[in-house]
Image (tube, coloured by chain):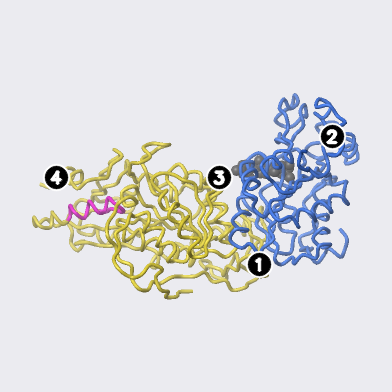
Amino acid sequence: MSEHLYKYLRTETFPTPFCAGCGHGILMGVILRAIDELKLDFKKMVFVSGIGCGAWIPSPHFKTDTLHTLHGRPVAYATGVKKANPELKVVVISGDGDLAAIGGNHLIHAARRNVGLTVICANNSIYGMTGGQLSPTTPKNTKTMTTVMGNPEEAFDLCKLVKACGAKYVARYTVFHTKPLIKAIKTALNTDGFSFIDVVSPCPTQYGRRNQLPTLYDMYAFIKNRLVHFDALKKYKKEELAEKIIIGEYRDED
Amino acid sequence: MKTIVKSLLAPRKYFMQGNIACAEGALAAGCRYYAGYPITPSSEIMEHMSIRLPEVGGVFMQMEDEIASICSMIGASWAGAKVMTATSGPGFSLMLEGIGYAVMTETPCVIVDVQRAGPATGQATKPAQGDVMQARWGAHGDHRIIALSPWSVQEMYDLTIKAFNFSEKYRVPTILLADEVVAHLKESFVVKPEIEIYNRDKTLTETPFGTQEEDGVPPMPCFGQGAQLLVTGSTHNEYGIRKVADPDVQERLVTRLCKKIDNHKKDICLTERYFTDNAEYLFVAYGISARSSYAVVSELRESQINAGLLRYITIWPFDEETLKECALEAKVIFVPEMNQGQLVLEIMRILPHQKVIPIPKTRGEAIYPSDIIKVFRKYHE
Ligand SMILES: Cc1ncc(C[n+]2csc(CCOP(=O)(O)OP(=O)(O)O)c2C)c(N)n1
Ligand SMILES: [Mg+2]
């Protein structure tokens, strides 16, 4: 991580617990860059996370107030923080299982209420921390510890879901898109109301190795080959989009 | 920090429902954030808060469920507010993981459980005292909480204030364990001109999660104060740094979370005694059951029978010493409860050599003096 970001970090807690090839470290850096470029008052920011590898991005690394909560509940906690003190800038960073499975109800209701939160989903499409079980964002047919024959279920498009619930700003990028991702995070942090960013993050350890993608490079290629930009969606038939990762800002349909 | 403040309501006599008195008590104590989910027989608390909180500059949130309610109020507590939620059995069950989190992170918060007949959905509009053990042991892991049991509309007001005070002072979730009878009872109660309240110590500290003493309560700075708080429900050291494999840290933390309550029982345990000196027949009760017991004891005293009542206002932690004192001369100890016998287990444990008779009632109605007398007659020659 670039040294000018060290002021935001408890460097004494390094190294981070993330595995080789995990994208969560890149995401950590990208979030801090966005904050640094916006020159936000870090002391007035609160980072709320649930339970999972993604939830460890802010806690204990960020050198400001962090609230490491229960599995699935960070959005509910964050709602209380923001409502009780609207002066604070409240950011939720957590995993896909945390935000979309056990915490899905809180996510859609916070979007509906338009609470002034930025929610960043560290989406590795797997339960990383507990050893690689199915998540609601695991693509169909993927092998996981609880779907050894391949996932028979459809995955959530979290951006579509949250957008439909009324979120003011919604975007998705992968951790490999650092520049547009920083821009999206900055837009989210400047959004008056609920903003959501789904960040696709590789997990070679728990996702890749059961799907013939054991290295970061394999995962990178696997993710890259499935990208479709939101603005190009019209060029595709519905069936063609089944396996795709839609990136870009989710704008209102016209 | 203890302070005396003016009551919010003008000081005088009021005629109110218990649930409304509870909400007013919360406001008087300084509650400025309420999050809840409707459930009978507690909903009037929520409805009243929805009107009153904005009037006093507070925030009211109707959340998507009880899990969200308790979690959002814990967040609000760390943002510096005094917070409360109210529910009944089914919602209380959903809140248990959050209660454990509040214990572990030492977050002041008040939970009102207006008990109704269970298990499950049970009888939504009918009273019970079935959550006594759940309040004590419901959250997983070894822990302590404080639970208070009101027997009147006056106490729905007074004990709500006390619940806030204990919760702020000891940084522990405090449960007001009411029941449908006191919650829906309408009777007069008095609002005094001034009340004593306790506000948490928000001193900036590097160690908001530990003390030198093994039973201490550290100061609790809030978000935005510059304390760089590391709040976590995982095992942590005094700085808040997670230590999920260190046996010493786990032992020190759990011991302090328990001892900060156990070693302050003198302050926390509230009881009331009626004719307990030399009582041959001792009734031990709490909440609405104590009110019926009081009627029984008064009647027995009029007939020159040596009966007494020990009323538990604080149920958890349980005051063992007072029980032993009151039971010294007792030939029989009766424990009327609106459950199949919960607090009586504690009493039997503490008085293994005495005759302890449970008087259970689980008919979805209050335990009446006649229910108690009927059992008493079997033991009174
Ligand atoms: C109530 C509850 N259920 C289950 C767990 C176990 N658990 C911890 S993390 C986790 C899944 C984490 O997945 P995700 O949110 O995607 O984060 P990741 O580790 O993949 O970054 C689970 C199921 C828990 N801590 N609490
Ligand atoms: Mg995950």
Label 4 to label 2, Cα distance in Å? 82 Å
The answer to whether marks 4 and 2 sit on the same chain is: no
* Chain of the residue under label 2: A
Residue B150 counted in the magenta span:
no
**Residue at x 67%, y 63% (from the top left corner):** A88
Q: Amino acid at mark 3?
A: Glu
Q: Contact (CB < 8 A) between labels 4 and 3?
A: no
**Numbered label attached to residue B64:** 3
Question: Residue tagged by mark 4?
Answer: B377
Q: Amino acid at mark 4?
A: Arg
SS class of the residue under badge 1?
loop
Q: Is residue B263 visible?
A: no
Q: Amino acid at mark 1?
A: Gly
Mark 4 or 1, which is nearer the eye?
1
The answer to whether marks 4 and 1 sit on the same chain is: yes
Q: x, y (%) of residue A230?
A: 83, 39
Q: Main secondary structure of the magenta part?
A: helix
- For the record, the magenta segment spans B284-297
Q: Earlier in the sequence, mark 1 or mark 3?
A: 3
**Numbered label attached to residue A233:** 2
Q: Earlier in the sequence, mark 4 or mark 1?
A: 1
Image quarter where ligand 2 lies: top right
Mark 1 or 3, which is nearer the eye?
3
Q: Amino acid at mark 2?
A: Leu
Q: Contact (CB < 8 A) between labels 1 and 3?
A: no
Disc 1 residue: CB within 8 Å of ligand 1: no
Q: Is residue B131 visible?
A: yes
Label 4 to label 1, Cα distance in Å? 63 Å
Label 4 to label 3, Cα distance in Å? 50 Å
